[in-house]
């Protein structure tokens, strides 16, 4: 895909990351991620209706961070 996605993928070796990994990547607390989700001020997590654990697509994060080439 692009530079940001490739960097994230090589760091995590998977295509989705957890809330704590997202917080670490953004340099904020998990509580800040919760607040930003509520305010819709961050890329929204994947819809995992049967699972309470939130995950984010690396592709969505890369686009949010400015990786706009596909």
Image (cartoon, rainbow, N blue to C red):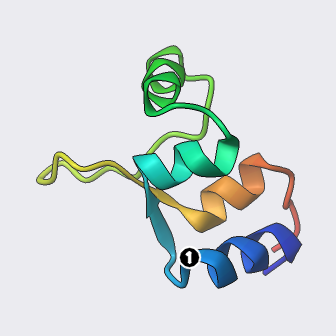
Instruction: Quarter of the image for the C terminus: give it.
Output: bottom right
- Residue at 79%, 49% (x, y): give it: 65
- Residue at 52%, 31% (x, y): give it: 29
**Residue 27 point in image, percent of width and height:** 67, 40
Using the rendered view, name the quadrant where residue 3 is placed. bottom right
Residue lying at the far left of the rendered structure: 50
The residue where tag 1 is placed is 12
**Viewer-proximal residue, 30 or 48?**
30
- Residue at 49%, 80% (x, y): give it: 14
How many C-alpha atoms fall within 10 Å of the one at disc 1: few (<14), some, or many (≥20)?
A: few
Tell me if residue 54 comes above or below residue 14 in the rendering.
above
* Relative side of 25 to 69, left or right: left
* Relative side of 43 to 66, left or right: left
Tell me if residue 4 comes above or below residue 53 in the rendering.
below
**Residue 13 point in image, percent of width and height:** 54, 84
**Residue 57 point in image, percent of width and height:** 52, 62
Tell me if residue 56 comes above or below residue 15 in the rendering.
above
Instruction: Quarter of the image for the N terminus: give it.
Output: bottom right
Q: How many marks?
A: 1
- Residue at 52%, 23% (x, y): give it: 32
**Residue 54 point in image, percent of width and height:** 32, 48
Assign a secondary structure to mark 1: helix
**Viewer-proximal residue, 62 or 33?**
33
* Relative side of 27 to 36, left or right: right
**Viewer-proximal residue, 15 or 25?**
25
């Amino acid at each position: 895909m692009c530079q940001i996605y490739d960097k994230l993928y090589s760091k995590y070796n998977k295509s989705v990351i957890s809330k704590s990994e997202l917080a670490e990547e953004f340099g904020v607390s998990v509580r800040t991620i919760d607040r930003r989700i509520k305010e819709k001020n961050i890329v929204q997590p994947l819809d995992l209706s049967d699972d309470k654990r939130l995950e984010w697509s690396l592709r969505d994060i890369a686009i949010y961070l400015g990786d706009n080439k596909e």
